[in-house]
Amino acid sequence: MNKNPKPSVADKLHVQNCVIFGATSAIAQAVAVLHARQGYTMALIGRNSEKLNQIKANLEVQGAPSVSIHVQDLNDFEQHQPLIQQILQEIGTLDRVLIAQGTLPDQIALQQDYALTEQCIKDNALNTISLCSHIATLLEQQKSGIIAIISSVAGDRGRQSNYIYGACKAMVTTFAAGLRNRLAIANAHVVTIKPGFVDTPMTAHIAKGALWAQPEDVAKDIMTAFEKRKNIVYTPWFWRYIMLIIMHVPEFIFKKLKL
Amino acid sequence: MAQDFAWGRLFQWPQAMNPLTDRNNALPKLESAQQSYLAHGLGRSYGDSCLNKDGLLVSSKQLQQFIAFDPTTGILEAEAGVSLKAILEFAVPRGWFLPVTPGTKYVTLGGAIANDVHGKNHHSAGTFGCHVHSFSLLRSDGEHFQCSPHEHSDFFKATIGGLGLTGFITSAKLALKKITGPWMDVDSFRYTNFDEFCALSTKAAKEYEYTVAWVDALAQGDSLGQGLFLAANHRQLPYSNGTDPYKPTKPKLSIPFEFPNIALNALSIKAFNFAYINQQRVPYKQSVQHFNPYFYPLDGIGTWNKIYGRRGFYQYQCAIPPNKEAMRAIMQTIANASSGSFLTVLKEFGDIQSPGLLSFPLPGFTFALDFPNKGEKTLALLNRLDQMVLDAQGRVYPAKDARMSPDAFAAFFPQWQAFTQFIDPAFSSSFWRRVQPTL
């Protein structure tokens, strides 16, 4: 079994690229910087054009040979296919793709308004699945490429404090596992990233404790996952063991816990 | 777990903090008109100059973008929350270095300007502010001032060393300096008293870019001021091929600071300090060191500030004009008290003038050490030192202070009244309120 195929000469000559959906998120920005420093060509997709332009300048200063930006609301699913085609035409192949868009809605608000629940599912599950469906076909054709999908430890087990967000991430995790299985034969790969608590603008309203990680630390783990074609990555690493425990608490006890 | 907002860990009050999310945004809203703002970076100021009790700290941690770099001039433009560590990671592989660096790289660009930090090359390069070409200052009324020696030059001068009181620095242009590699040629001299230090320092100032001495603060009598004098230059050799210039395989002289945190306590640090000075029995030694252990020995142990326990610690740094007797008297007072930290940093500042209005360095001696917080006893000693510094017409560094009196501040910085006109009406700090004259 060859887990880490050595790059061929052609691979080495080809300037690698990295496409990031949800590029203005804190984790995505940190991942982008690491790629820029290694000389990757970048394509950034996000909603906020001003922020994307700032990030583009940053990545160019830090070493990216070129950075293209695509201002797109990813809730417009119709646009996914043409957007991906357009990016593909610009950069030739898809070497690395990071799916990082998402929201962290207030669970109580979701419980009180189903429309918000549905929106949460679109934001955190369906648009990832839609994007990956289009990208997977391309990777199968080019017989290469890696998609890293940011899921969450929240998807490992439903808890009252965020089970709707968790359910979205569970869908993403299961989808990613299946897609990894499907793409293996085509030499393409899917990494499932499961971050724990990360100190980002998305979590700015939550009090921080000892378990919180910085986006830069998570980005390093994502970088390693790309390089080593890892399958499922808990980041920081200790979340693997926290979730192992949480998943093994019997349901008759778990249902009474305040988690 | 409560977050520490200042490095000395002396003040544990709850502190509100919100980030500025974009350099073009306005400041976050205050809860009431009585509240005030203060910019906050990595919280490496020791005392209360980076705190704002009952006010709002505006964090720069989301301002991490590089904006532009000119590889011909070395001028880097970046957002204020970018750390010196990030600048080094960017610059060193490209053959550039910080023009001036303090003893930690965990400070932000904005913080380095607001405190007009200095380093071991003060005699040859002046302060950090001497290398800042311009910056953008966000005022509480939403206006952005572009400040440089040519534009809003009065705010430029007031903001350099202005302790964050003139507004929020959102981005800055800094002139980096050219280097040929990450290595330092370090010459270390073991010297036996303060006179020898002075002779070494005068001579070394001409031959070395960087000079500093580690002084055994407990030495008395004939040995007063004895220690290790470290003088260094950037090594003028090109990179060797195929190695990552930022990460050394191993520094040649590895400073044994990187032992595990669990082994750290005040006692072991004292033992280490003793070993550090006494490791070198020979009067003169040459070595090649990577810039990381040379400039940032303490960064290797992360939160070393916690070794002083729950009560925290005071750091005291003063600068006095070149008056040997006054310097000797101050060192003698500390040696007699023997409650200070074991190790003292001693350096001679040069006469390069900073543009900063409230800038700390002045030509003469500067001298810094830690004091574990032992309450009144420590405060009484520090007040006595203040008086000696005042008599010598020197000053104490606000970025490290947590206790100087309003009178002492006014005497150290007589220019403070001229400074007040540039303070943003909605900005304040715990330090600033503390040193205001009581009416």
Image (spheres, coloured by chain):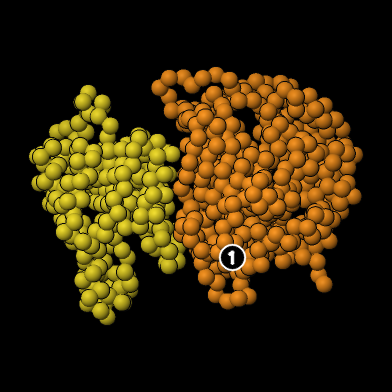
Chain colours: A yellow, B orange
* Residue A239 visible in the displayed image: no
Mark 1 element type: loop
Chain under disc 1? B
Is B408 placed above or below B332 here?
Answer: below
Residue pictured at 27% horizontal, 38% vertical: A17
Question: Which is nearer the eye, A186 or B30?
Answer: B30
Residue type, mark 1 in image: Ser
Q: Position of residue A159 (x, y in %)?
A: 27, 69
Residue positioned 52% across, 70% down in the render? B29
Residue found 15% across the figure and 52% down from its top: A81
Residue A173, quarter of the rendered image:
bottom left
Q: How many marks?
A: 1
x then y, percent, for residue B158: 70, 53
Name the quadrant of the C terminus of chain B. bottom right
Q: Is residue A256 above or below residue B425?
A: below
Residue lying at 81% horizontally and 70% vertically, measured from the top left? B438
In the image: residue A162, left or right of residue A136? right
Left or right of B225: which side holds B40? left
The residue that disc 1 covers is B140
Which residue is outermost to the front?
Answer: B150
Residue B72 horizontal side relative to residue B349, left or right: left
Mark 1: give few (<14), some (14-19) or many (20+) Cα within 10 Å. many
Q: Position of residue A52 (x, y in %)?
A: 37, 51
Q: Quadrant of residue A91?
A: top left
